[in-house]
Amino acid sequence: MVETWFDCRYAGQSHELSVAAIDQFGPEHQRRNGFSRPDTAIEVVALRASARLPSPIDLADLPDPGGRAGVVVGPAVIAEADCTIWVAPGWRAAVGGGGAWVLTRC
């Protein structure tokens, strides 16, 4: 699935609003700011896109999250206190000398 957003503003403004289509800018500006300027040019200052595919692996099929000891071979998920690390198939993870996980291709 691909989603796109346009960061738009009226000419001369210093802030933008993100909308899915340029023609949504006027109504969104009205909703957020209480006014619109239908006769003022709209500037598109950025176009952003995001593409996502469904995961080929069901999370229920992954092994339990590993601890900080040993080597974890993908596919696997490592649960840390501040993040979750995905170890893809064909990769392995091991705790390095500095305490950080180091991922290498098998």
Image (cartoon, helix red, strand yellow):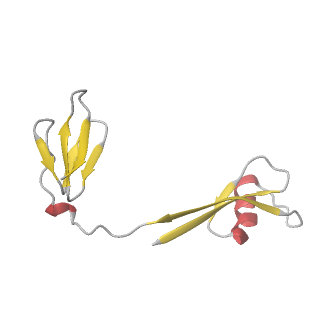
Please tell me how many numbered marks the rendered image carries. 0
Residue 81 vs residue 46, the one in the foreground: 46
Which image quadrant is residue 31 in? bottom right
Q: Is residue 98 above or below residue 21?
A: above
Extreme residue toward the right, this view: 39
Query: Residue 102, how many percent across, how many down?
Result: 25, 40
Q: Is residue 23 above or below residue 105?
A: below
Q: Is residue 104 above or below residue 70?
A: below
Which image quadrant is residue 38 in? bottom right
Is 55 positioned to the left or the right of 26 in the image? Answer: left
Residue 70 vs residue 44, the one in the foreground: 70
Which residue is rendered at x = 21% and y = 61% of the image? 59
Which residue is rendered at x = 78% and y = 46% of the image? 14
Query: Residue 48, how many percent across, how many down?
Result: 59, 61
Query: Residue 57, how many percent across, how many down?
Result: 22, 66
Is 67 positioned to the left or the right of 104 in the image? Answer: left
Query: Residue 63, how many percent across, how many down?
Result: 12, 55
Residue 41 vs residue 92, the one in the foreground: 92
Q: Quadrant of the N terminus?
A: bottom left
Extreme residue toward the left, this view: 70
Which residue is rendered at x = 21% and y = 33% of the image? 96
Which residue is rendered at x = 71% and y = 52% of the image? 16
Residue 75 vs residue 82, the one in the foreground: 75
